[in-house]
Image (tube, grey):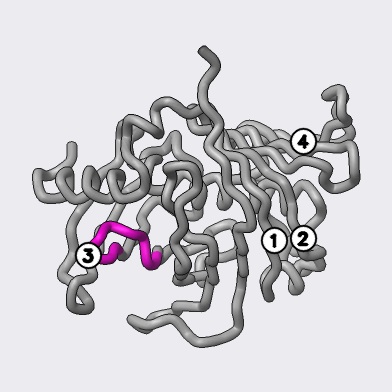
Amino acid sequence: MIPGDAERLIADVVAAHGGETLWRSLAAIEAVLSVDGFLFTAKRIKPLRRQRVSASTTEARFTFFDWPLPGQRGEWIGEEEVRIVTGDGTPIARREQPRSAFRGLRRELWWDNLDFLFFAGYATWNYLTTPFVFLRPGFRFEVLPSAADGITRVRAVFPDDVPSHCREQVFHFAPGGELLRLDYTAEVVGGWARAAHLCVDYRDFDGLRAPATRRVRPLFHFADPLPFPTLVAIDVHELRPVKKAG
């Protein structure tokens, strides 16, 4: 159940990003991204340069095309599975229940391709589908006291069937409804991994409005994120809403 003030706010935020009618007409969002940052360097993961991806709008599913090698695909399928397949869909590598598997000393030191596929899959699916993911049933919202003039903060509690960094996150919205920042703990990295995810350079992509530049910085126990290091950097070069067939 959504309190009245939160319900109105979420409706305004969705409208500011393109609107519910447009969103419900889509099957997917395709994008071309570059991704790097201290987290991936620390885990021995190579940066992504102009990587083509697709986020489903109807289910928790995300695809990396021509990754990790040309002609292959990396597929994140919710909490059930991650897999790398050939062009015809033949599995090369797979891991079931990847969140449960994401533990142990090895992952403190380095990630393999399936580790990265799980983390980057669920995280980027969240980023590209927010705030429309709030239209799914089961979310709970609380409008928090404003931290700055004109900035509205909302605590969102995610339902169990929406994979994310953690169940409870705080979203910061500009007066016009644009998402400025989201705060979360990346629990698969560690309970200490609190971060502020900053969103700037809003653009119109065929009716969808979204930030083209995203930077993730350490948050720890302060109200403001630390200026460095940049844990994750995401640059959106292209973004295209894909309509449902028919």
Residue range (magenta):
173-181
Marked residue nearer the N-terminal end (4 or 2): 2
What numbered label is drawn on residue 175? 3
Q: Quadrant of the N terminus?
A: top left
Marked residue nearer the N-terminal end (1 or 2): 1
Marked residue nearer the N-terminal end (4 or 3): 4
Q: Which of the 4 image quadrants contains residue 104?
A: bottom right
| Amino acid on which disc 2 is placed | Arg
Mark 3 Cα-neighbour bin, 10 Å: few <14, some 14–19, many ≥20: few
Name the residue at 47% across, 60% down. 211
Above or below: residue 103 compared with residue 196: above
**In this image, 8 relative to 160: left or right?**
left
- Mark 4 — residue? 83
- Mark 2 — residue? 49
| Amino acid on which disc 4 is placed | Arg
Name the residue at 39% across, 28% down. 24
- Mark 1 — residue? 34
Mark 2 Cα-neighbour bin, 10 Å: few <14, some 14–19, many ≥20: few
Q: Distance between the residues labelled 4 and 2?
A: 21 Å
Residue found at the far top of this picture: 246
Q: How far apart are marks 1 and 2 (CA)?
A: 5 Å
Q: What element carries label 2?
A: strand
Name the residue at 53% across, 59% down. 187
Q: Distance between the residues labelled 4 and 3?
A: 41 Å
Are discs 1 and 2 less than 8 Å apart at CB?
A: yes
**In this image, 28 relative to 210: left or right?**
right
Are discs 4 and 2 less than 8 Å apart at CB?
A: no
Q: Is mark 3 on a helix, strand or loop?
A: loop
**Residue 77 on the magenta segment:** no
